[in-house]
Amino acid sequence: MTTPAVRTRARTRPARAAREMPDALWTRADLVVTVVLLAAGVLLVVLAWFGASDTTDWDSQMSWTALAMIGVVVACAGVGGWLYRGFARVRVEARAVRRSVGRRIAARTAPAAGADDAVDRRRVTVAGMAHHHRADCLLVRGKPVVAADETLLKPCGVCA
Ligand SMILES: [Zn+2]
């Protein structure tokens, strides 16, 4: 025998699970539409099966076969719509994630307001390079840089 507190908790759990989950890929309406279409499709196939089972007349069996095919189409439409709605939501979420990541990257790489004066404007190069770069250029990062003579070298196409 369970205590009243345990019974109460057990009763509230399904109620919480039955609530709409905001992160769920499908809504309850999607599930209902899919189940209704699947049930209708299966019902049509079963109906056609029983309708055609006692007949030997070709025309009659063709009519029942057509009904079964309609049932299959209805069931496939239910599943197809369910998948389409799921894929559409995945696309929307993926787009939102890409935008969010893009904003975060832009916020990290964009110089802060007034920080333009603090940017190192020295031009540097590495021995053997034909171009001069900003000190923070990816092409010279981690290399032994020296101050560049801008009159002798070409500007870097990446950081110029
Ligand atoms: Zn460069």
Image (cartoon, rainbow, N blue to C red):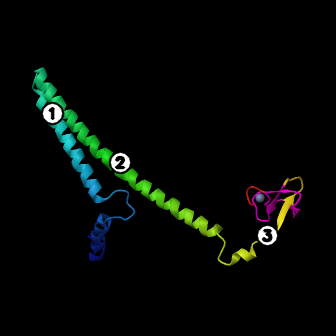
Foreground pick, 157 / 11: 157
The dot on residue 61 is none
At mark 3, the secondary structure is loop
Extreme residue in the front direction:
151
Foreground pick, 13 / 56: 56
* Residue 142 sits in quarter: bottom right
Residue for point 37% across, 60% down: 24
Residue 59: x and y in percent read: 12, 23
Q: Is mark 1 within 8 Å of ligand 1?
A: no
Residue 55: x and y in percent read: 10, 24
Residue for point 25% across, 38% down: 73
Name the quarter where the N terminus is drawn: bottom left
At mark 1, the secondary structure is helix
The dot on residue 121 is 3
Q: Is residue 158 above or below residue 103?
A: above
* Residue 4 sits in quarter: bottom left
Foreground pick, 94 / 153: 153
Extreme residue in the bottom direction:
114
Residue for point 32% across, 44% down: 80
Front of the two marks 2 and 1: 2
Foreground pick, 80 / 18: 80
Which residue is identified by label 1? 48
At mark 2, the secondary structure is helix
Mark-to-mark CA distance, 2 and 1 = 27 Å
Within the displayed image, which quadrant is ligand 1 positioned in?
Answer: bottom right
Circle 1 residues within 10 Å: few <14, some 14–19, many ≥20: many
Earlier in the chain: of badge 2 and badge 1, it is 1
Q: Is residue 148 left or right of residue 26?
A: right
The dot on residue 83 is 2
Q: Which residues are magenta?
A: 131-155
